[in-house]
Amino acid sequence: MDQERFQYILRFALQPGHYEKENIDRLMRFCTAAGINDVMFFINCEELNQGHLSLSETRPWVELISHASEKLETIGVTTSINPWITLLHADRGRKLKEGQNFMLMTDPYGNRANAVVCPLCDKWREYLREIYALYASIRPHMLWVEDDFRFHNHEPLYWGGCFCDRHMEIYSRMANRHLERKDFIDAVLSPGEPHPYRKIWLDISRQTMTELASIIGQAVHRVSPETRVGLMSSSPSAHCSEGRDWKGILGGLSSENVPMVNRPHLPAYAEVTPQNYLWNFSSASLMTQALIPSGTELYPELENFQFTRFSKSNCFTRFEVESTLCMQAKGVTMNLFDMMGNGALLSEGYQDSLAYNRNFIDTVKKLEIGREQQQSVKIMFSSKSSYTLHTEEGKSMTELYPRETFWCQLLNCFGIANVYCGDQIPEHSIIAVSGQFFRNISEIELKRLFADNFVLLEAEAAYTLFDMGYGRLAGIGNARWHLQDSGYQAYEQVCSGYTCLGVEEARMSAQVSAGDFLEIEYVGQPFTISDLKDPYGKNTGSGMTLWQSRVFILPYGRFKGIPHAHLNPFRQLIIQDILKSQKIGTCPVFIRGAPYLAVFSFHKEDQKCLMLLNSSGDDLQEIVIYAPGYGGKGILEFNRVTGAPESVEADTSDEWITLKSGIKNMELKVLMWPSNTKSCS
């Protein structure tokens, strides 16, 4: 495999005994036309899934993949294997086979699956060792663990598991008392300060999956030391609720000879609006990138369910592929064709779409820039927030899902460069906090965070600070919640003489999709940018507020879905102007007057780079960029077909760049600066 190139990895179903020769021939034609580097063959997949296959049932799949591998090698394409199941995604009517006396997963209410197994089952673990050794016997380039490698989301179970009798025995032993299932769950989810049983649940879940990863990794590498073992992952917040140890799991799957490999979820199984894609890309894909250890190879998953252009257009597929460059992926895995064995459907034209801008994609990949080079607003998060957060009702396992992605989502939609930051508390930076992140850091770290940085808060972060007894760090003397659509707040009106886009006292909605409103009584006299109003125009609280020129508060939180009420040009302009006025930390790069044009800013040694991802539905004729210190001379843009760097026509000043070339809908533009430009101070 040519590691210099961006890897096009095709996930592909080839069923033993079903038109094998014809499907291999068409597969090879597709790979040649599309520039595929690796084919990841499914085993026992989706509609063809027959539960936990025996070794004898698996061998025909492995033998067929080995035969296909020999054919693909002649055209320079490597072979990988993607077993469809470990624990099993969902029963879907499947049952254990005769002789498979595996323990089955049990949900919080005692419901037991028919085929989804409990990861503590010793007999199943031995089976897993044997079957992964069989997969490894043909020495695939990569061998994947699917995203059923998790506790949550195993239908028909409610939420997931595992709360089987063996797990309950372990929980009881850790608690030093006999625990009934309901009592344990109630304690894990109890509102307020986390009950000690929460830690038991998370620690055992964390340990179980880390052990399991090591079992798989060792089984593979005893047979094929050079094979990379990769993990597909899904929702980071859901993984957090089961205590996922990202370093432990990925490290267990890897070895000293091969790197850690992760396949994060791209958030569009079928085509959605690019605006919706950007919102969820910011919370799922970019958060996963931030969670995995440095040096992990990243191959995001592009899923095309139900696998024709009726599900997803070629244009949107290309947009997804390009978006992975913003997360510095080594390549992309693509599930383009159905999983029933029909093979490559060349009439869909995916090969032409993938080949069109391949040179551009390879060129950008070779820049070798990473998250550590991103200079932008820092979004705080913790990989262990489920240990510390306070639940509200204590009724559902989903209450353990952290809500720390809001600022990344909002700022990307507003065209403001940002990056997740979870390693340590930054200094002299612009940082943004949402959810209950503050519960994860010490008093010393908390005070240093506010003393050394300019801080953006949404309402849940502000309330958490107040609830912990540190509200005065942000000027909060008292705070109380008002539910969305309660009628207490109906709209928000800009005040303080601030004119937005020529509109005096501009108004924005504070209901329907705004989230709950946090009414704050401030200490001293903050600068109030907007007021909340009831339907009759009466003031009911402060809206956007700047306290001592060091803390900006957006008083909404506990959002239900995408908070569309906040996605408007007035709020975009105000937040950009607030950031522009700050003199602390790295200058924030942003795009003026364009919705859903995300910007990713990198500075590596003497290189400066901006990636612009147009997630709107519009072509833009020009792009206005606030980029102080980037300089205006010698800006280069990579041609989208040839990949060659070309000079850019632009109007420039010390702080602003207006690109005349514009950008098309669902397109990535990559700009580079020569080495002699001044750094941003």
Image (cartoon, rainbow, N blue to C red):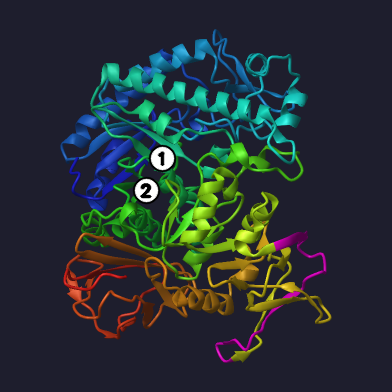
Q: Helix, strand or loop at disc 1?
A: loop
Nearest the viewer among 666 and 314 is 666
- In the rendered structure, the answer to whether residue 95 lies left or right of residue 413 reads right
* Identity of the residue drawn at 34% across and 64% down: 601
Assess whether mark 1 and mark 2 are in contact (beta carbons under 8 angstroms).
yes
**Residue that label 1 marks:** 342
Q: Position of residue 286 (x, y in %)?
A: 44, 52
**Which quarter of the rendered picture does the C terminus lie within?**
bottom left
| One can see residue 638 in this view | no
- Point out the residue furthest to the top here: 99
Nearest the viewer among 117 and 210 is 210
Spatial CA distance of label 2 from label 1 is 8 Å
Occupied quadrant, residue 675: bottom left
Q: Amino acid at mark 1?
A: Asn
Task: Check the image and report above or below for 651 versus 210.
Answer: below
Q: Position of residue 171 (x, y in %)?
A: 65, 19
**Residue that label 2 marks:** 345
Q: Which stretch is magenta?
A: 477-502
* Identity of the residue drawn at 60% across and 32% down: 154
Q: Helix, strand or loop at disc 2?
A: loop
Q: Residues within 10 Å of mark 1 (few under 14, many from 20)?
A: some
* Identity of the residue drawn at 33% across and 56% down: 325
Q: Position of residue 643 (x, y in %)?
A: 20, 64
Q: Amino acid at mark 2?
A: Leu
